[in-house]
Amino acid sequence: MQDREKRRWRFLGRKRGGERGQSLVETALVFPVLVTMLVGSVEVARVVRASIAVANAAKAGAQYGCESGFTAQDSTGIATAASNEASTFTVTTNSSVACTCSDGSASTCLNTDCANSHIEETVSVNTQATVNATVQLPGLPKTFTVKGQSIQRVVQ
């Protein structure tokens, strides 16, 4: 009785001949896919980080521009504030000032435009940067363009 039981346990403990190395083959097939997913995730994280930095740069430029009517016209100062905020990226900055009268009528930013109300200035800052991919993966572009925009009212 003991011999029969020992043989049965030996048979159950052995792998069949066709299953040897199956785990190794499965690992070899799945490993490249996992590595590609990991590298792709790192690339996406880099682009998201750049996008956040460029959006923050636009906000910093608009905050500088909305300090007064003088700084709203200072496009160089606005670009400098934006570049200082996103110093790890080459940021392109465009800024503009729009004016309206507080009663809702149009204005060209001249003091004579709003006879019965006052002028309200708005600074708009657009930023843009290009992020190059560190590793070229199939299905992903070689460069990514990220943009930011901020619009704020000038303090008067």
Image (tube, rainbow, N blue to C red):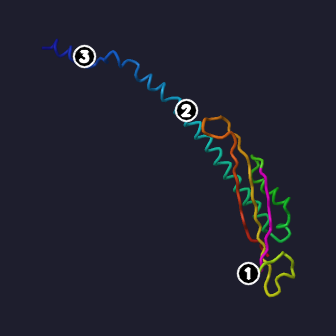
Q: Which mark is residue 104?
A: 1
What is the C-alpha distance between the residues marked 3 and 1? 90 Å
Image quarter of residue 79: bottom right
Residue 92 on the magenta span: yes
Q: Residue at x 16, y 11 (%)?
A: 3
**Which kind of residue does numbered mark 1 sit on?**
Gly
Mark nearer the viewer, 3 or 1: 1
84 shown above or below 21: below
What quarter of the picture does the C terminus occupy? bottom right
Q: Is residue 3 left or right of residue 69?
A: left
**Quick one: label 1 or label 2, which is nearer the N terminus?**
2
Amino acid under disc 3: Phe
- Horizontal side of residue 31 vs 120, given as left or right: left
What type is the residue that disc 2 sits on?
Val
Residue 45 % position (x, y): 61, 44
Q: Nearer the viewer, mark 3 or mark 2?
A: 2
Look at mark 2 in the image and give the residue it sits on.
Answer: 35
What residue did someone put label 3 on?
11
Q: Which residues are magenta?
A: 91-101
Of tags 1 and 2, the one toward the viewer is: 1
Q: Determine whether the residue tagged by mark 3 lies in a helix, strand or loop.
A: helix
**Residue at left offset 71%, top offset 44%:** 131
Q: CA distance from mark 1 to mark 2?
A: 58 Å
The residue drawn where x is 17% and y is 16% is 5
